[in-house]
Image: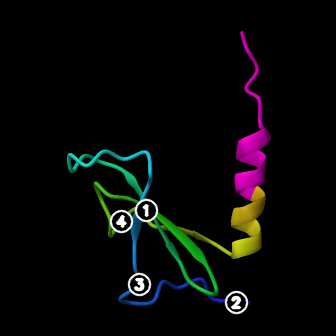
Amino acid sequence: MESTAIPAGIQWRKSSYSSDQGGDCVEVAVTPLCIAVRDSKIPTESIVTARPATFAAFLNWAATARPELP
């Protein structure tokens, strides 16, 4: 089984939708083994990781998903 542990010293990037006012945002880090996503409000407690192929599948689903209207 592959490890998706997050190595120390990786570079986190803020979402392009975040403001420059220092507000809360989503941050992402890319390593060869995983994509990590975290909430900037609680950066050490909210890290979610996925293998690159799994993350790509999620992004594809999110881009094409249509919520049902009531």
Residue under label 4: 45
Query: Along the polypeptide, which appears first: circle 3 or circle 4?
Result: 3
Query: Along the polypeptide, which appears first: circle 2 or circle 3?
Result: 2
Q: Do the residues labelled 2 and 4 touch (CB within 8 Å)?
A: no
Based on the picture, tell me whether residue 22 belongs to the magenta stretch: no
Residue 40 or 21: which is nearer the viewer? 21
- At x 74%, y 90%, the residue is 1
- At x 32%, y 58%, the residue is 40
**Circle 4 SS class:** loop
Disc 1 residue type (three-letter): Arg
Span colored in magenta:
58-70
Residue under label 2: 2
Query: Along the polypeptide, which appears first: circle 1 or circle 2?
Result: 2
Q: In this view, does 1 lie above or below 19?
A: below
- Spatial CA span between label 1 and label 2: 20 Å
Based on the picture, tell me whether residue 66 belongs to the magenta stretch: yes
**Circle 3 SS class:** loop
Label annotation for residue 38: 1
Residue 42 screen position, x and y as percent:
30, 59
Q: In the picture provided, is 46 more to the left or to the right than 49? A: left
Residue under label 3: 10
- On the rendered image, what quadrant is the C terminus found in? top right
Q: Do the residues labelled 1 and 3 touch (CB within 8 Å)?
A: no
Disc 3 residue type (three-letter): Ile
Q: In the picture provided, is 29 more to the left or to the right than 56? A: left
- Within 10 Å of the Cα at label 2, are there few (<14), some (14-19), or many (20+) other Cα atoms? few
**Circle 2 SS class:** loop
- Spatial CA span between label 2 and label 3: 18 Å
Residue 22 or 38: which is nearer the viewer? 22
